[in-house]
Image (tube, helix red, strand yellow):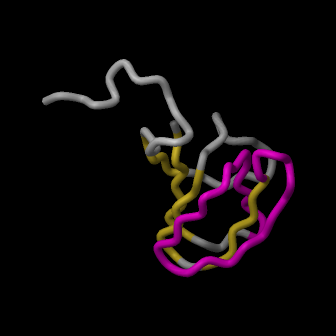
Amino acid sequence: MTNPFEGRAPNLAGPARDMLPITPSDSADLASVCIGLYAEGAGSIVFTSETGEIRTINVPDFSIIPVAIRRLHATGTSATGLHGFSV
């Protein structure tokens, strides 16, 4: 099988290279900033953006949030099935 990503530098203009499950935490940042977030189940999401701003949003089922996220907070987050897009 050929891999079109082989030898290609990570690029914010291209597709994410992986999608990782995220466990919300009030004290720990993600291992690396995600370029977006996917929520399987509806609810509220409290996050710290890449710029350091804390935001709260409400999302429906199967939502894609195209914002860079540094931390996904446990307190206030009720959406389920949360995954981060990484490059």
Please state the horizontal and vertical placement of residue 40, each as a whole percent of the image: 47, 70
69 versus 2 height, above or below: below
In the rendered image, residue 3 lying in the magenta stretch gets the answer no
Quadrant of image for the N terminus: top left
Compare residues 7 and 28 and report the one nearer the observer. 7
Compare residues 2 and 77 and report the one nearer the observer. 2
Residue placed furthest toward the right: 53
Left or right of 57 in this view: 36: left
6 versus 39 height, above or below: above
Residue placed furthest toward the front: 13
Compare residues 30 and 59 and report the one nearer the observer. 59
Point out the stretch of residues depicted in magenta.
Answer: 49-76
**Residue at image location 50% in from the left, 51% down from the top:** 21
**Residue at image location 54% in from the left, 69% down from the top:** 80
In the rendered image, residue 68 lying in the magenta stretch gets the answer yes
**Residue at image location 78% in from the left, 70% down from the top:** 56
